[in-house]
Image (cartoon, coloured by chain):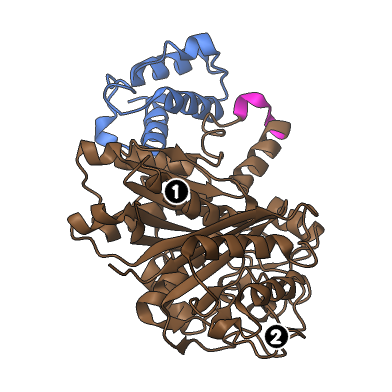
Amino acid sequence: MSDTADRVKKIVVEHLGVEADKVTEDASFIDDLGADSLDIVELVMAFEEEFGVEIPDDAAEKISTVSDAIKYINEHKG
Amino acid sequence: MRRVVVTGLGLVTPLGGDVETTWANLIASKSGAGQITRFDASNQKATIACEVKGKDHEYGFDPDKRIDPKIQRQVDPFIVYGLDAAGQALEDAGLTEMDEATRERAGVSIGAGIGGLPGIEYESVNLHERGPGRVSPHFVHGRIINLISGQVSIRYGLMGPNHAVVTACSTGAHSIGDAARMIKDGDADIMLAGGSESTVNPLGIAGFAQARALNTSMNDRPEAASRPYDKDRDGFVMGEGAGVVVLEEYEHAKARGAKIYAEVVGYGLSGDAYHVTAPHPEGKGAELSMRMAMRKAGMEPGDIDYVNAHGTSTMADTIELAAVKRVLGNDLGGASMSSTKSAIGHLLGGAGAVETIFCILAIRDQIVPPTLNLDNPDEGTEGVDLVPHKARKRPVRAALNNSFGFGGTNASVIVKAVED
């Protein structure tokens, strides 16, 4: 498991208050982890902070699973 | 006519995270005051407050009992306190599991005077230092006043009136009075009503200190600083916390065999039409408010046994007392009157609800809570029982709570032991 994946999952666990084993790469934030649209805004902000990337709104709207987030961050982090 | 009774109580205060702990400490003459621990207050004019204690404290508050950690993270403390007090009140009333028809007739009116000032302060600094993209998406709905009512409604599925009073330090009393009227008018059979506040933050303390409202002369003696009616009083001590009651239509409560604490029999409200922070020097607004409540209750002087005064430990204490004397008589018609702000500080928007609950408990236990630190009573207090230092057993059939706020807003609520 990559370092990015670990750090993304840790943020998801902290922000959504879910069990770590539920945060699989296929997990959907809304359907599987009980997030709402505002939780996702908050998660995206936390990813930006953690990885020093900027995630514009149109890109953020396409991030719906844990793997979407990992993929975007790996492609864009400096 | 529909009658309104109280069937559940909930408290989060500087003296306890629940009703019985708070009440026991209040009756034991304990003080909730101390140095501010929430932030470094060393550069403030007032360095003391009555803070709600953490869960490790002997009489602390544990938010994890009832509130999802995710919600705790998203909202200001005043919402956490209000939501917990509402949960306590529903549990006390045996109303946590209501069918849909009952929930459609159950509403919420829990207000605050100021709302989420700590979060506003934090995000304002955040905005300036890091830019708009760093402001929390939960900023607005985690700070605005009606979001206690909103959160309570969502948590417990309450679909009746969803309201929130904002009348500074009379919020809690107005909430109870207004919600009782909603039940009388048939808008609901059950209402959760009360108030909450938490502004123990740098901006809150500085703001009230600059308005010359806070005690700044006794930072070295926090437990002595709130001293209503005493000659040496010089401002209030900031408190925080929440009080929520379950109000219920009398027949509805009887039909389900509910425990009934008291009946809400009188409610008065008025405006001073005088000054933004100072009360009318003759206490005319206070007098009008009390007279209206007495008239609605059909009561005469002598029918009230206990007055929980607004009594903030400012110059206004004796103005209120003069107004109470004009309404109840120079000896208050035999009533005892105390200010529990001497023990828990001033809970601002929470005060009126917390203090109405103290009135209800005074009726339940036939004991009146004390006015702490009343060492040298000021002029005008002669011949009045201000219950100095120690609680006292006495008959309490009915009690009146006064709450007055910035803007010259006044509210009085009368509760009474229930009679068929």
Q: Who's the residue at 76% across and 52% down the image?
A: B273
Image hue for chain A:
blue
- Mark 2, other Cα within 10 Å: few <14 / some 14–19 / many ≥20: some
Q: Who's the residue at 48% across and 82% down the image?
A: B368
Tell me the amino acid under the disc marked 1.
Arg
Q: Is residue B117 left or right of residue B175?
A: right
* In front of the other: B53 or B296: B296
Q: Who's the residue at 67% across and 43% down the image?
A: B121
Residue range of the region highlighted in magenta in the rendering:
B129-134
> Which residue in the protein does label 2 denote?
B381
Q: Main secondary structure of the magenta part?
A: helix
Residue B181 has which mark? 1
Find residue B331 and report its horizontal and vertical position in percent. 62, 86
Specify the quadrant that holds the C terminus of chain B.
bottom left
Residue B318 among magenta residues: no
Quick one: SS at disc 2? loop
Q: Who's the residue at 35% across and 52% down the image?
A: B1
Question: Between marks 2 and 1, how big is the CA–CA gap?
Answer: 34 Å
From this view, report whether residue B174 is shown above or below residue A21: below
Q: Quadrant of residue B40?
A: bottom right
Find residue B24 and report its horizontal and vertical position in percent. 41, 79
Quick one: SS at disc 1? helix
